[in-house]
Amino acid sequence: MCENFDGLYKETCSSVLKELEITLGSIDTAALEKLADEILKADQVFFIGVGRVLLSLQSVCKRFAHLGVKTHYVGEITEPCFTEKDLLIVGSGSGGSIFPLNIAVKARQAVPNCRIVHIGSNPNSKMKDICDFMVRVPVRTKNYLEDEIDSCQPMTTLFEQTLLLMGDILAKMIIEQKKLDMKKLWQYHANLE
């Protein structure tokens, strides 16, 4: 592929890890704590996103299910009814992706007292008028806002990676806060594999 693949690989790893460290460190911990509280008090937690954002959110959805949280992603074949006791987490870096935005609008119209949280980069998107609050991941999106953290990675890769890691970090913090036994969490893991 190239003359110095080993060196290029190590250099790229270093760049990606540095970006993730900067990004994770830039997230408002008060907003993250509020998100964790909302997750724990919700009857069910629903996730919505598209593309690679949805893939990252599906991983987060599964991880929280491993903690005993009732989780679903919008569109799954066994998706139950969304109620005012539930939480909708909308992942959209730009805050303008049509499907997540329309699902947030639909949730607000169908269940006015529900809780909706937007995880994204653009604090001035249409989501701001629909969601209860935002967890801002201030990384580059298709909007190229002035204060977004730039990335050497293609498109919105840094946002998708941060979503996944942020979900796993919150899960670890919930495990510690609730003093959950890691070995007992296997009771929630799939066993038909």
Image (cartoon, grey):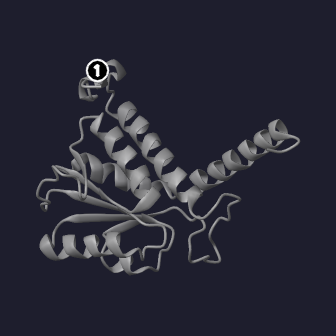
Q: Label 1: how many residues lie within 10 Å, few (<14), some (14-19) or many (20+)?
A: few
Task: Give the vertical position of 140 relative to 11 (above or below).
Answer: below
**Toward the viewer: 133 or 71?**
71
Residue to which mark 1 is pinned: 184
Q: What's the residue at 30%, 69% (across, down)?
A: 132
The amino acid pointed to by label 1 is Lys
**Side of 59 relative to 12 (left or right):** left
Q: Residue 175 placed where, x, y %? A: 36, 32
Specify the quadrant that holds the N terminus.
top right
| Residue 107 picture quarter | bottom left
Q: What's the residue at 36%, 48% (across, down)?
A: 58
Task: Give the vertical position of 74 relative to 92 (above or below).
Answer: above
Q: What's the residue at 25%, 29% (across, down)?
A: 188
Q: Which element carries disc 1, helix, strand or loop?
A: helix
**Side of 72 relative to 172 (left or right):** left
Q: What's the residue at 43%, 66% (across, down)?
A: 92
Total numbered labels = 1
